[in-house]
């Protein structure tokens, strides 16, 4: 069934042709970086540079105006000074452009409402959907459409979409994710001032996007709260929506107004609405990343019963406290599981959950102890989720040969890791595990919190 909102946004994400307006001969300027990103990432459509003072840019034929391009232009990326954007939009209207990503700043965030309103009036009359202004725009890893003026390379395609009312998520934040995280990206949308395209519309588009399984959002203000919550309630039944909202204090809301020209609203009202709509509210960027990779990598837990396997007894105690604080129960492991663990554990050691792994490591070696313990608790029908605390340090064999890392091994319950020890070895083991789809955390409480949020989300979505 056709969805008018989704159909109208397709040119914003899936254009067959795009013109970059404001490409310069200077390689460091915004328009030039945008144009190079499209070329170097091999955008699947046609790309046209627009510059009134150049015939060729980066060995590609340039045009003095978008309406002089002889072929169809479905989308434009506008990177010219704010006072010129109204005239540019008029030319786009004459050309029959369907989508405009306006990266230019200097509009309502600076008090220039007149310019923004005039631009939107022209766009609406011509049926052009506008993302921005004051944004880095859009990324679609399915076709390598990208509009950011930050150099981007080595994109990892995956199932996570990020939506933000700021350019940070398609700029510095994306660079941070690409260089340090192992989950991949499906879409990124920087909405900027939200002069036209709003959060709820993007969320509706992502709900029907087969590439996206998890949506992470950064919001400063909500324009149409009722519509946003209506759409969220439908989406969260199928896909988790994680929201980090800023401007929650009086001083923060004033900064929001100067950043994107938005009104942030009362935080307690927003928080209650999120709970009603099944949205997962997060408090920091670190927490957003923690939860995103848990949802992106692992299946949802069927219940709240947790098994903990820890190299250290203290780790088991910390995990137990964290489970109690987050509404999780430490599972009672079965007799069958106990028998499996006894094969690698000294007779003097009492077997409980949390499983203190170190006596088994001393008796049977790291690989056999780890494999036996992890396999045993994963196979236990009374366990809904597993947290493993590993220690890695110099002079100790790293557990590269875990059974769970073997190709074709798929688990029906979530398995999360916490790794402690030497920094270099932690990073090495984190890469091994996360590339296989197991989220890793530097702190036990953060791993437990991620699993607890997955459980709460699963319970909530069944009630919606």
Image: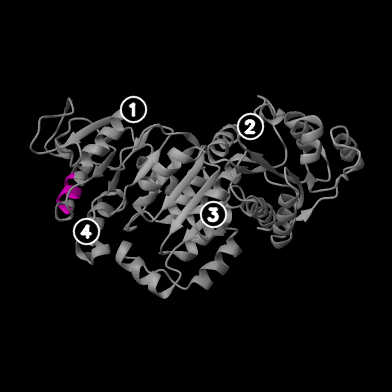
Identify the residue under disc 2: 395
Q: Is residue 89 magenta?
A: yes
Residue 287: assigned label: 3
Q: Is residue 44 above or below residue 118?
A: above
Q: Residue 274: x percent and y percent?
A: 56, 63
Q: Mark 3 vs mark 1: which is more N-terminal?
A: 1
Report the Cα–Cα distance between label 3 and label 2.
33 Å
Q: Which callout, 2 or 4, points to the residue nearer the camera?
A: 2
Does the rendering let one see residue 10? no
Does the rendering let one see residue 443? yes
- Colouring scheme, one of rainbow, by chain, secondary structure, one colour: one colour
Give the SS element for disc 2: loop
Q: Residue 342: x percent and y percent?
A: 88, 36
Q: Which callout, 4 or 3, points to the residue nearer the camera?
A: 3
Report the Cα–Cα distance between label 4 and label 3.
32 Å
- Disc 3 + disc 1, Cβ < 8 Å: no
Report the Cα–Cα distance between label 2 and label 1.
45 Å
Q: Mark 3 vs mark 2: which is more N-terminal?
A: 3
Residue 106: assigned label: 4
Identify the residue under disc 1: 42
- Disc 2 + disc 1, Cβ < 8 Å: no
Q: Residue 222: x percent and y percent?
A: 43, 64
Q: Residue 59: x percent and y percent?
A: 17, 25
Q: Residue at x 54, y 54 (%)?
A: 287
Q: Is residue 186 magenta?
A: no
């Amino acid at each position: 069934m056709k969805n008018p909102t989704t159909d109208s946004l397709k040119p914003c994400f899936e254009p067959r042709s795009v013109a970059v307006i404001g490409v310069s001969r200077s390689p460091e300027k915004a328009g030039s970086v945008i144009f190079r990103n499209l070329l170097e990432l091999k955008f699947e459509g046609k790309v046209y540079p627009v510059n009134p003072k150049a015939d060729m840019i980066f060995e590609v034929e340039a045009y003095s105006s978008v309406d002089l391009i002889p072929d169809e232009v479905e989308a434009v990326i506008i990177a010219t000074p704010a006072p010129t954007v109204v005239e540019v939009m008029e030319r786009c209207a004459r050309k029959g452009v369907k989508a405009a990503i306006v990266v230019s700043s200097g509009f309502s965030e600076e008090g220039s409402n007149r310019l923004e309103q005039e631009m939107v009036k022209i766009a609406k009359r011509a049926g052009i959907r506008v993302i921005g202004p004051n944004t880095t725009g859009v990324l679609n890893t399915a076709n390598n459409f990208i509009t950011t003026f930050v150099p981007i390379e080595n994109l990892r395609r995956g199932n996570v979409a990020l939506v933000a009312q700021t350019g940070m998520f398609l700029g510095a934040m994306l660079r941070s994710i690409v260089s340090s995280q192992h989950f991949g990206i499906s879409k990124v949308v920087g909405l900027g001032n939200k002069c036209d395209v709003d959060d709820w519309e993007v969320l509706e588009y992502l709900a029907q996007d087969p590439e996206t399984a998890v949506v992470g959002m950064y919001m400063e203000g909500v324009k149409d709260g009722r519509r946003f919550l209506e759409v969220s309630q439908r989406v969260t039944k199928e896909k988790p929506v994680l929201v980090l909202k800023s401007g929650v204090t009086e001083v923060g809301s004033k900064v929001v107004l100067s950043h994107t020209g938005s009104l942030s609203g009362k935080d307690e009202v927003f928080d209650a609405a999120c709970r009603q709509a099944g949205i997962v509210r997060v408090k920091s960027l670190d927490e957003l990343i923690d939860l995103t990779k848990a949802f992106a990598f692992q299946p949802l837990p069927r219940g709240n019963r947790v098994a903990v396997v820890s190299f250290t007894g203290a780790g088991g105690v910390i995990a137990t406290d964290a489970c109690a604080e987050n509404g999780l129960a430490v599972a009672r492991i079965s007799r069958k599981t106990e028998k499996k663990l006894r094969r690698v554990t000294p007779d003097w050691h009492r077997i409980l959950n949390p499983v203190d792994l170190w006596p088994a490591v001393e008796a049977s070696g790291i690989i056999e102890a780890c494999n036996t313990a992890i396999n045993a608790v994963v196979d236990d029908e009374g366990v809904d989720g597993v947290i493993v605390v590993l220690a890695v340090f110099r002079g100790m064999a790293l557990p590269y040969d875990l059974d769970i890392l073997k190709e074709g091994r798929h688990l029906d319950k979530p398995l999360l890791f916490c790794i402690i020890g030497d920094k270099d070895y932690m990073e090495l083991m984190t890469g091994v595990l996360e590339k296989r789809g197991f989220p890793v955390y530097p702190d036990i409480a953060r791993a437990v919190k991620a699993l607890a949020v997955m459980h709460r989300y699963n319970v909530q979505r069944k009630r919606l």
